């Protein structure tokens, strides 16, 4: 029986020397791998009391949508600036090589709603920290943050101190 790690393709020195790029598209390309990924992520939060799944653009949408469907929860999307058509709130955050902005519709999370944040990757923690700030700006509560892969060497958990953080797989290094 294959482990989740077996479905992930690792590309050395991409996009630059010293980086071990973890390609999750190979998980999506295999029905058994995708099922295992979703099942594993759901199992990590089976004890969690939450109302809504908040998924970040773009691969977080894949995991978040499947989990929301299976768990009977609504799905809220966090997108890059300018991608949402109605009134939004936004948060600016730092990237490894610059800055970016995330947005959420102002009516996407109601005050007091408990939210599970879902993304594909926890690296430096910037994207998920920004998503958590958006939820909190709307009066929601971050019940937990979950990702498919965590790159332990980038210490993203430190940026998310104070939140419950779950990852299906943790790779050492970058």
Image (cartoon, rainbow, N blue to C red):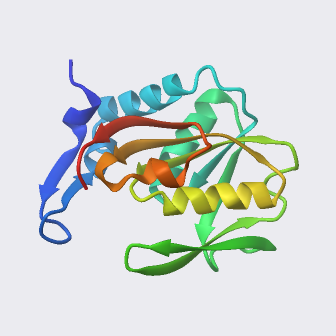
Quadrant position of residue 56: bottom right
Residue 35, position as x, y percentages in the image:
39, 30
Quadrant of the drawing holding the N terminus? top left
- Asked if residue 81 lies left or right of residue 110, the reply is left
Task: Report if residue 128 is visible in the image.
Answer: yes
Of 85 and 40, which appears nearest the observer?
A: 40
- Residue at 45% x, 55% y is 59
Task: Count the labels in the image.
Answer: 0
Depicted 11 relative to depicted 169: above or below? below
Depicted 139 relative to depicted 6: above or below? below
- Residue at 24% x, 35% y is 5
Quadrant position of residue 106: bottom right
Quadrant position of residue 16: bottom left
Q: Residue furthest right?
A: 111
Residue 124, position as x, y percentages in the image:
42, 59
Of 125 and 84, which appears nearest the observer?
A: 125
- Residue at 23% x, 51% y is 173
- Asked if residue 83 lies left or right of residue 28, the reply is right
Quadrant of the drawing holding the C terminus? bottom left
Task: Report if residue 84 is visible in the image.
Answer: no
Depicted 130 relative to depicted 95: above or below? above
- Asked if residue 114 lies left or right of residue 120, the reply is right
Residue 119, position as x, y percentages in the image:
49, 50
- Asked if residue 126 lies left or right of residue 174, the reply is right
Residue 123, position as x, y percentages in the image:
39, 56
- Residue at 17% x, 66% y is 14
């Amino acid at each position: 029986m294959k482990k989740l790690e077996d479905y992930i393709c690792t590309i050395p020195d991409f996009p630059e020397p010293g980086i071990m790029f973890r390609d999750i598209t190979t998980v999506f390309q295999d029905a058994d791998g995708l099922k295992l990924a979703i099942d594993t992520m759901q199992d990590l939060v089976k004890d969690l009391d939450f109302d809504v799944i908040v998924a970040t653009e773009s691969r977080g949408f894949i995991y978040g949508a499947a989990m929301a469907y299976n768990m009977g929860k609504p799905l809220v999307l966090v997108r890059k600036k300018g991608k949402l058509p109605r009134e939004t709130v936004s948060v600016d955050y730092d990237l490894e090589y610059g800055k970016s902005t995330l947005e959420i519709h102002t009516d996407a999370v109601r005050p007091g709603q408990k939210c599970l944040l879902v993304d594909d990757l926890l690296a430096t923690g910037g994207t998920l920290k920004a998503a958590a700030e958006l939820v909190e700006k709307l009066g929601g509560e971050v019940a937990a943050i979950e990702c498919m892969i965590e790159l332990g060497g980038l210490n993203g958990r430190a940026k998310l101190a104070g939140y419950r953080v779950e990852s299906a797989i943790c790779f050492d290094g970058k």
